[in-house]
Image (cartoon, helix red, strand yellow):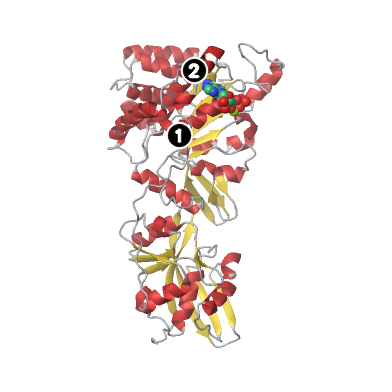
């Protein structure tokens, strides 16, 4: 038996947006009717803790007090959601009865939901919680066994995988130690198995455009008739994307942890995300939101690809909300209680048919749509949205010879090596400037001025293009960024006029702008 403390204080963590906020779980036992009060802005799931904790303590063979239990979650200004406070609340009650040494837990964070039989369950957002624990000087973190690999991504923090409440009690009371978690070092299987580029016949110019896009992180719109291979090509893209640095991996994993989308057995996301939501997706599903705001698809695609197939079907309202995040690389969600920001630096790959029947401009099958219908269909994608897309590419049907031939194209691996080389050049270029800039598509006006200077020949080509193609200022900057990527792929220090010419031919021709 230990001395009964005045008050049990155990540290846990809440997640607000993508950041953790330390929460103090204070437990007191007072005279009064048996039961439990939980105060400090708890949501319904936290209030339900009372029943779970009581049963779990009894089933762990520990005593439950006959008096009233009062739990305060501080700071009261942060909304506490979910069942992850079960474990700290249960520990507080055990401690208040003199069954635990308070010193054993004072520099630790405790996180986990309890089942009725006392098993500790997974919690959402363990990675940002562990990062906050380290930042605030905590030495240890107690999480469920399932969450231990995720918490162990943060160096300098001792991670204890807790199977059950009684195991944690045994550890803290000193009669059965839990061993800290040690990563096994095994690589998890790849998360997004890609189609190989070699399997896509013909379409060399589309593959080239996708290579440029992957190299510089540029947005792409593919337009073509049904069955031309648009979806196939987009799905092959993950195979040529460059690798992620460890910082990028942690950034992405944090978002997946908060959205509770980390696949089991994958504590760290090492491959660039490839998200392809269906066009019936809601506004909140795409950009993020909900009662307790969670990241949407554009954030889940952070540092990776957002593939929107059947682009016009998404509806103009849904597409227009993406305009701001596409420029700012973050999305801000406003709530009555302040606003939250989620990262959303994604590369958009969109695919569409040119008209409702799908065959407008096809070399073999006539289009059955009236011209006005074609225009109306194409207008579903607004001018400002098209202006944000650097690479517009037509995907014509493949002819029989190419399709039936057994000549395989270049493998994804070979293309990926070139993409990686171009990325390495960019990484060197931006290593001294702002750390948020990783690829050419991230450049802002200052960097464009610094790194995208044109020679005389290039300048006159650009001047002619600006007036003939009626380009906006944004389009001007985007063309320069694209030309920079094409030069990087060629290993050229300077942007030559051939690089600029290739960048210019990716501008839209048939549509409104
Ligand atoms: N270039 C190609 N090489 C090999 N197979 C192809 C090619 N293009 C299309 N195919 C075959 O046709 C199928 C359909 O292609 P895909 O779904 O990519 O067409 P799409 O352009 O997206 O059509 P839609 O406009 O109807 O969505 C593929 O699954 C593949 O089997
Ligand atoms: Mg398709």
**In the rendered image of this protein, does residue 245 appear above or below residue 489?**
below
Depth order, front residue of 145/339:
145
Nearer mark to the viewer, of 2 and 1:
2
**Side of 88 relative to 174 (left or right):** right
**Side of 370 relative to 226 (left or right):** right
**In the rendered image of this protein, does residue 505 appear above or below residue 101?**
above
**In the rendered image of this protein, does residue 327 appear above or below residue 5?**
above
Instruction: Specify few, some or many for label 1: CA neighbours under 10 Å numbering under 14, 14-19, or 20 or more.
Output: many
What residue do we see at 66% from left, 20% from top?
A: 375
Q: Secondary structure at mark 2?
A: loop
- Can residue 352 be seen in the rendering of this structure? no
What residue do we see at 48% from left, 70% from top?
A: 87
The answer to whether the beta carbon of the residue marked 2 is less than 8 Å from any atom of ligand 1 is yes
Instruction: Return the x and y of residue 369 as percentages of the image width and height.
Output: 71, 17
Figure quarter occupied by ligand 2: top right
Q: Secondary structure at mark 1?
A: helix
Instruction: Return the x and y of residue 144 as percentages of the image width and height.
Output: 45, 63
Q: CA distance from mark 2 to mark 1?
A: 19 Å
Q: Quadrant of the C terminus?
A: top right
Question: Which residue lies under the disc numbered 1?
Answer: 238
Q: Quadrant of the N terminus?
A: bottom left
What residue do we see at 38% from left, 30% from top?
A: 440
Pointer 2 or 1: first along the chain: 2
Question: Which residue lies under the disc numbered 2?
Answer: 202
């Amino acid at each position: 038996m230990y001395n009964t403390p005045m008050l049990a204080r155990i540290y846990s963590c809440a997640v607000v947006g993508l950041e953790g906020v330390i929460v103090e779980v204070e437990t007191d036992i007072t005279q009064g009717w048996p039961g439990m009060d939980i105060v400090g802005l708890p949501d319904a799931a936290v209030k339900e803790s009372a029943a779970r904790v009581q049963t779990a303590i009894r089933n762990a063979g520990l005593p439950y007090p006959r008096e009233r239990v009062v739990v305060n979650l501080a700071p009261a200004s942060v909304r506490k959601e979910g069942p992850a406070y079960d474990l700290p609340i249960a520990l507080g009650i055990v401690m208040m009865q003199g069954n635990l040494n308070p010193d054993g837990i004072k520099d630790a964070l405790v996180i986990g939901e309890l089942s009725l039989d006392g098993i500790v369950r997974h919690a959402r957002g363990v990675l940002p919680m562990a990062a906050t624990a380290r930042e605030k000087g905590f030495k240890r973190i107690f999480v469920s066994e399932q969450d231990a690999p995720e918490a162990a991504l943060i160096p300098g923090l001792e991670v204890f995988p807790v199977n059950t409440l009684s195991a944690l009690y045994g550890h803290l009371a000193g009669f059965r130690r839990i061993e800290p978690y040690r990563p096994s070092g095994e690589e998890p299987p790849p998360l997004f198995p890609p189609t190989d580029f070699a399997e896509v016949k013909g379409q060399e110019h589309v593959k080239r455009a996708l290579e440029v896009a992957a190299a510089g992180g540029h947005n792409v719109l593919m337009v073509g008739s049904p069955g031309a291979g648009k979806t196939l090509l987009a799905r092959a893209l993950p195979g040529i994307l460059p690798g992620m640095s460890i910082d990028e991996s942690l950034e992405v994993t944090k978002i997946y942890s908060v959205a509770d989308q980390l696949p089991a057995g994958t504590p760290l996301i090492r491959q660039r995300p490839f998200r392809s939501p269906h066009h019936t997706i809601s506004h909140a599903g795409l950009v993020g939101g909900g009662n307790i705001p969670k990241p949407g698809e554009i954030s889940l695609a952070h540092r990776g690809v957002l593939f929107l197939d059947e682009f016009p079907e998404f509806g103009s309202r849904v597409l227009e909300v993406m305009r701001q995040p596409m420029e700012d690389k973050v999305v801000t969600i406003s709530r009555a209680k302040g606003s939250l920001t989620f990262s959303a630096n994604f590369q958009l790959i969109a695919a569409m048919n040119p008209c409702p029947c799908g065959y407008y401009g096809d070399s073999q099958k006539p289009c059955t749509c009236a011209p006005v219908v074609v225009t109306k269909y194409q207008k579903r994608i607004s001018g400002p949205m098209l202006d944000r897309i650097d690479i517009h590419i037509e995907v014509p049907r493949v002819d029989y010879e190419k399709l039936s031939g057994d000549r395989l194209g270049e493998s994804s691996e070979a293309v990926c090596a070139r993409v990686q080389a171009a990325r390495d050049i960019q990484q060197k270029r931006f290593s001294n400037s702002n750390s948020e800039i990783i690829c050419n598509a991230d450049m802002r006006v200052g960097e464009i001025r610094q790194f995208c200077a044109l020679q005389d020949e290039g300048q006159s080509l650009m001047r002619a293009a600006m007036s003939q193609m009626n380009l906006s200022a944004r389009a001007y900057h985007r063309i320069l960024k694209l030309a920079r990527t094409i030069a990087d792929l060629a290993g050229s220090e300077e942007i030559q006029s051939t690089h600029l010419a290739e960048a210019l031919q990716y501008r839209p021709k048939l549509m409104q702008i």
